[in-house]
Each structure stands twice: as C-alpha cells, then as structure tokens.
Amino acid sequence: MTLVSIIITTDDPPEELGGAIETALDQTHEAIEVLVVDDGSTGGTAALFDRYEARDERVRAFDRPASHGVAARRNDALERARGEYVSVLDAGDRWHPEKIERQLAVIDPLDEEWGAVSTGWITTRNGRTTVIYSPRSDRQGDIYPAVLLGYGFGPYSGLLIRAACFETVGGYDTDLGCGEEWDHCIRLAWEYDYAAVNEPLVEHRIQDRSAEQNAIRNHNRPRGSRAVTARRLENGTGPYGCIWRKHGAEIHYYPDFERRYRARRDLTCARIELDCGNRLAALQRARASIAREPSIGALSVVLLACLGSRATSGARRLAGLQADRRLREESISFPARAVRPRDPAATTSVSK
C-alpha cells in the first residue's frame, strides 16, 4: 500500500494539535506516517506527543530548539519523511476521513508529470459553516503561468504532493518570510501538472483574524491611516509583497500580468479590510482593483462596503445557510468541531 507522509507543524494549543493528529489517524488510507514538528508551543504539547507516540507507531514527533518559522519546520519534516506522497496538515484544519484515499485514487494512476492533487474545501468561522468551495478550473492541469496571479488552492492542507517533486523543485523557502506555500506551488507548476478531486474534503477553520490579516494590519498599514498602500504591500511582509519580490520578473514577463496581479492584490486587501470592519479602506481597495481589472468580486465588496455591516452579516448568514444545506444534501461530514480530541491515554493502541 502506498505510504503517505502527513506533516503537521504547530505552535498552537494542545487541543488544536490533538485534533489535527486525530483527523490524520482517522484516514481510511491506513498506510500513513504522521510527522509532528513543534516550534515554540507551550502548555503540555510534550506530554501530548508522548501519549500519541505510545498509542500509534505511525506518529513521530520532534521539536526544534528555537523558533525558525513554518518553512524551516516543514523542511525538517521532509528530511525525515519516508512516504511516496506528502500532505501538509495545518493544526487548525480538519480532513474528511477519505481525503487521502480519494486523492490517491486520482493521482496514483497518472504519469509522474502530474505532481500534485488538490481538493475542494469548506470554510467555517468560529464553528459555523460560511461557504463551500470547489477546485478552480484554472488550478488543474498545466497551471503555469496562471498561478503567478494568485495562490488559488484554498487551505494548503488540501494538497497531496508526490515526494519526488521536492527533489526536483526543492523544499519551502525559509528566506521568503510569507507566502511560502504559494511560492512552492509556483515552482511546482513550472515542472508538473496539477490534478483535482472535485469534492470538499478539507475543513478550513477560522478563529478570529488569520495570519494574513494580522500581517497586513500590523506590518503593512501606515501609522495613523486605515489604508494599506500598494507600495507597502509590494515591499512589506504580506504574501503579495513577498511573491512580487521573488517572482516579479516572471510576472512582468507576461503581457498584462502585472496589472492583473495588482488588481487581485487590491481585491484581497479589500476583502480583508471589509472582514475587519474597515468599510472605507475596503471601498478604496476595491475601487483600485476595479480600475485595473473589473470583477464581480470587487463589485461585491463595493456593494457591501456601501450597504454597511448589516448587509455584510446578512450575506455571510445566507452563504452559511446555503453551505449547510449542501453539506446535508451531499452527506459531507467532518470531525465534530465543538468536541475536544479524544485523550490518547484513554484510547487503545491502533495497529498498522
């Protein structure tokens, strides 16, 4: 049976980490190894590691002596990985039990020019479903140079990658600072094609603000202003700025790509500002995006910013109701969101 290496890196609380390990061990494809890298967690993670390693020999945990960032942690795990495929699982995300099995059924029969397979996903906010996504058509097959314009895969936990691809394109860029996943997908797309499973098999859970929101709010925002300037984004620590610094020459090479790249950067910022309640900043960024590349997404932000917070809340509730109905109709289920992970000390051993 094909061995799959699942990499979990964390500085999250033990309950988040425990839930991630559980969702990996619950996969119907049993030939897995779970590599857990800790980098700065506190409050019982060492004891949690010990219990899981004692419970299931497929779990291997190790830590770094000091914080070196998520890219370095994942590279450490890659050096220890023994599987034919690799899938990174963020500690806050959860998988459908058949996620690995269904992805292998798609990519394993394909030629080696197919390097990765993605999947659809659902997003939940504070435990409530907000929207269901399917894999984008422009993120299947030969996706270069389209991937230069935006990441587009949803949670990185949704990708399953051939281990041999890392030998070809390398690991995660530890010098980038942000956008390591997008950068790796760009390099992978230069060499390989992408397949997809058109089902939502990942639950991406949002609690409060995301790291991307914090990066833009805390690093790229000029003092005394709500606006996020294009110059700060290009030269700052956000993903669009980091990708521009590394791949700007590639983006500039393709006609019109720079304009479209800036438009999508503006739209991303507009959505984040709207999500944070900064209606004026959201309106400014959306208008800038429309000026470069008119889109339904940017027009929607303009409409919601003008109508106010009640309209935004109403739109989210409506999207959530539609997503919940689809989950029921298609019998899509994920691990219980409100229940803490089982105590591994109270669980019997699982044999391979």
Image (cartoon, rainbow, N blue to C red):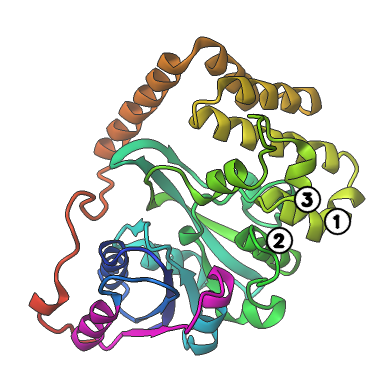
State whether residue 201 is above or below residue 189: above
Percent coordinates x, y for residue 151 in the rendering: 63, 51
**Residue 133 covered by magenta stretch:** no
User: Which corner quadrant holds the N terminus?
Assistant: bottom left
Most distant residue in the top direction = 307
Task: Residue type at mark 1: give it.
Answer: Glu
Q: Residues within 10 Å of mark 3 (few under 14, many from 20)?
A: some
The residue under label 1 is: 250
The residue under label 2 is: 186
**SS for callout 1:** helix
Q: Which residues are magenta?
A: 46-73
Circles 2 and 1: CB atoms closer than 8 Å: yes
**SS for callout 2:** helix
Q: State the residue in front, 175 or 99.
A: 175
Task: Residue type at mark 2: give it.
Answer: Ile
The residue under label 3 is: 235
Q: Is residue 94 left or right of residue 288?
A: left
Which residue sits at x=72%, y=50%? Answer: 236
